Image (tube, helix red, strand yellow):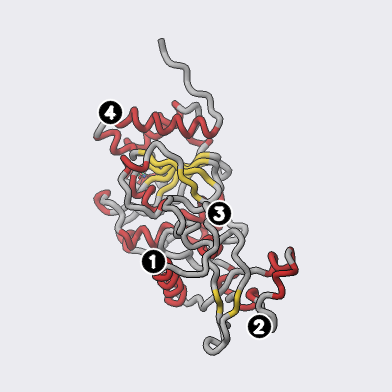
Amino acid sequence: MCPPHFGRTRRCAPTNSVNPDTRAKLEARLKYYRDVGIPAFYRDRAASAAADPSRESVGVGLRPARDAVSADARVGLKPAPTKAPTVQGKIGDLKVAATDAHSGIGRAPVALPVMQAPGLFDAADRVEGDTLERIQADIGPDCRLCKLCRKRKSIVFGVGNPKAELVFVGEGPGADEDAQGEPFVGRAGKLLTQMIEAMGLKRSDVYICNVVKCRPPENRTPEPDEIATCSPFLFRQLDAIKPKVIVCLGSVAAKTLLDTNASMGKLRQQWFEYKSSKLLATYHPAYCLRNPPSKADVWKDLQMAMKELGLEQPKRKK
Ligand code: URA
């Protein structure tokens, strides 16, 4: 059994038995794929088989795993799964016994090679050669995937450096952001900008985006179905940028990226792994505006990020 952890890159030793929790997650994920029209598929193991010919003997006489991958799954243009990708290592290293995807039933299970990174769920989320432009184009000019489309004025995609080493992830646009089409431009945004500048950076050095791209009415918290529908675009943005550091602003972002219900008090002041990035969670600037002493806590968290990024700590005023 792997020790509990957040993040997606830690790996555990492969296991032959599937625990009930993992099985349920796996079944839910596969059901989702069936619901959106993606037939059963398996990871492309052709590359690892080529690199290690001994692996080719596995499953001799049966269709290679590559041929069992559906065209849709390989092209990767379908929206990624609706739930946050499950923590790698809990399920990323499962040995999966596959049956023939297209003939369906009756084939004997095939013992496939032990998985190499990325794991099953990471591979499913990833769009090869993805770019921010392509993600924005996939959202389109008039996205209708969830009910937030009814009242929004703008789709607030994200702003900043597409090669940023530091990405801030908020919750969702407010009224000002909805009006201007840019994240974090209202009161909370001005505070975030001050914090970025206190780090010795400009807004244009970093990338800023949100979990949901459309304003929830009355600035309510985005609902689970809205997060589930929109967060795959966030996952793709992070995959495309591959920042060194991700800072989650508030618990909606932290819960979405870490797939946890832990409170911010428990999450902050420590590093998590999110794919190849390091992830830090801190209070949302709107919370700091309501509760000014929390600004000092956020600054402590941002100093951790600065250290990780090799940024010089500002000199203390005498
Ligand atoms: N709050 C957020 O979470 N995001 C914004 O873009 C603005 C306010």
**Between marks 2 and 3, how big is the CA–CA gap?**
40 Å
**Between marks 1 and 4, how big is the CA–CA gap?**
40 Å
Relative to 28, residue 230 above or below: above
Which callout, 1 or 4, points at the residue further toward the start of the chain?
1
User: Which residue, given by chain and number where applicable, does mark 3 sit on?
Assistant: 133
Q: Nearer the viewer, residue 240 or 159?
A: 240
Left or right of 69? Residue 89 is left
Identify the element where label 4 is drawn. Answer: loop
Residue 124 placed where, x, y %? 53, 65
Which callout, 4 or 3, points at the residue further toward the start of the chain?
3
User: Which residue, given by chain and number where applicable, does mark 1 sit on?
Assistant: 21
Of the 4 image quadrants, the one containing the N terminus is bottom left
Which callout, 1 or 2, points at the residue further toward the start of the chain?
1
What label does residue 104 carry, if any?
none
Identify the image quadrant of residue 229: bottom left
Relative to 225, residue 103 above or below: below
Indicate which quadrant contains ligand 1: top left
| Three-letter residue code for mark 3 | Glu
Of the 4 image quadrants, the one containing the C terminus is top left
Q: Residue furthest bottom?
A: 106
Which callout, 2 or 3, points at the residue further toward the start of the chain?
2
Identify the element where label 1 is drawn. Answer: helix
| Three-letter residue code for mark 1 | Asp
Identify the element where label 2 is drawn. Answer: loop
Instruction: Determine if residue 150 is in view.
Output: yes
Within 10 Å of the Cα at label 2, are there few (<14), some (14-19), or many (20+) other Cα atoms?
A: few
Within 10 Å of the Cα at label 4, are there few (<14), some (14-19), or many (20+) other Cα atoms?
A: few
Instruction: Determine if residue 232 is in view.
Output: no
User: Which residue, given by chain and number where applicable, does mark 4 sit on?
Assistant: 293
What label does residue 62 carry, if any?
2
Foreground disc of the pair 2, 3: 2
Instruction: Name the residue rendered at 54%, 33% in the picture.
Output: 309
